[in-house]
Amino acid sequence: MKSFKTKLKLNNQQKTIVAKHAGVARHAYNWGLATCIKEYEETQKRPSAITLHKRLVAEVKSINPWYYEVSKCAPQQALRDLERAFKNFLTIPKRGFPKFKKKGGKDSFYLEGSIKILKGNYIKLPRIGIVKTYEILPSVLIKNVTISKRAGNWYISFKYDLEPAPNSPVKKRAVIGVDVGINTLATCSDGTTYANVKAYRQAKKRLVRHQGAVSKKVIGSKNRIKAVKRLAKAHKKVANIRADTLHKITTWLAKNHSTIVIEDLNVSGMLKNHQLASAIADCGFYEFKRQLTYKCEWYGSELVIADRFYPSSQICSHCGHQQKMSLSMRTYECGHCGFTADRDFNAAVNLENYVSQ
């Protein structure tokens, strides 16, 4: 499966109807959560999503006619999401109890049925009609979509079956080692380097200014709503810059190399270093690994993850001698053979050699 997400270009009428869908989904979710809590306190049992939907039709829809102005899929999926949230709370450690949803906080809804991609960047959605997107849509069969709101804009996302390529793409290089870091985001064993854009660091002053503007506004006022929207757009821009950089690097690696070797970084442990936590989080190491994992499957490449305790930075890539290296030392100088190289490049070459060991 391959996913696709793009921004919608909506007129005022369409913005109203998608906001209604999100509102109905949020109302159904909150009603279902309140019902589950109340029934559990009385009977020590929690109703299923199917039972909740039957009660929703009988008890809620009859007194709220605006439910009939939107697709029935929106409240149905909201109750399924609620059931999954309860299951995650009971089965997955550190998952909190389901919370009530607030308006404006990650509004979204689900649609299925007569969905059809038209020519170019148009898609036909049930109860909403023909909607224009900012990107050309793939000519594929779609069963369902999710429409969500982020930083004042509406986005559509869906999954479709990825057809296997008839012939394996020709790779430019058999094996490549990739060392990720803070100063240089990715250093490859062929000498290619990708700079760290440091999106959050570059926008930190602007984010602080927007956050201060929000804190000075009266809660509930229109000016505060506007300030929150500006802050959300600033955060979204930072996330987009980081995601764009990671996508370009991982796509290039997966497309042009048969085997890619990276380190198994303990990101959660690295974030405990409060002096470097902000810089490490700004790099997106986990997202780098996640994107490489599925893109290697797309392009027929193999991802090899070196052992977490493999000393790639301490081994001389020329003679194999191992020596201690502090974080402040950016150049590797071998005490055995005199080989000198950039610390990250030396580590990348060692990662490339890892598969032959």
Image (spheres, rainbow, N blue to C red):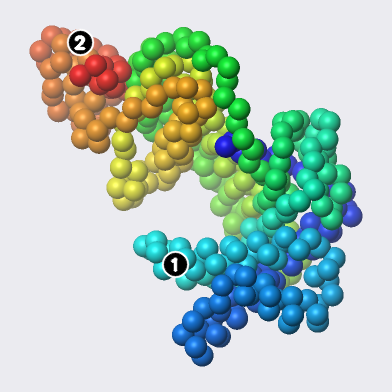
Note whether 176 is above or below 102 in the view shown. above
Name the residue carrying label 1.
89
Instruction: Please say whether residue 197 is visible from this viewpoint.
Output: no
Residue shown at the point (69%, 57%) measured from the top left: 109
Q: Amino acid at mark 2?
A: His
Residue 249: assigned label: none
Q: Quadrant of residue 100?
A: bottom right
Vertical comparison of 189 with 13: above or below: above
Question: Circle 2 — which element?
Answer: loop
> Label 1 sits on what residue type?
Phe
The picture quadrant where one finds residue 316 is: top left
Crowd rating for badge 2 (residues with CA inside 10 Å; few <14, some 14–19, many 20+): some
Q: Which residue is rendered at x = 56% and y = 85% of the image?
A: 38
Q: Is residue 20 left or right of residue 318?
A: right
Residue at which label 2 appears: 318
Residue 216 lies left or right of residue 317; in this view the side is: right
Above or below: residue 295 compared with residue 190:
below
Q: Position of residue 96 (x, y in %)?
A: 45, 67
Image quadrant for the N terminus? top right
Does residue 259 show up?
Answer: yes
Q: Is residue 139 left or right of residue 82?
A: right
In x, y percent, where is residue 18?
79, 56
| Secondary structure type for disc 1 | helix
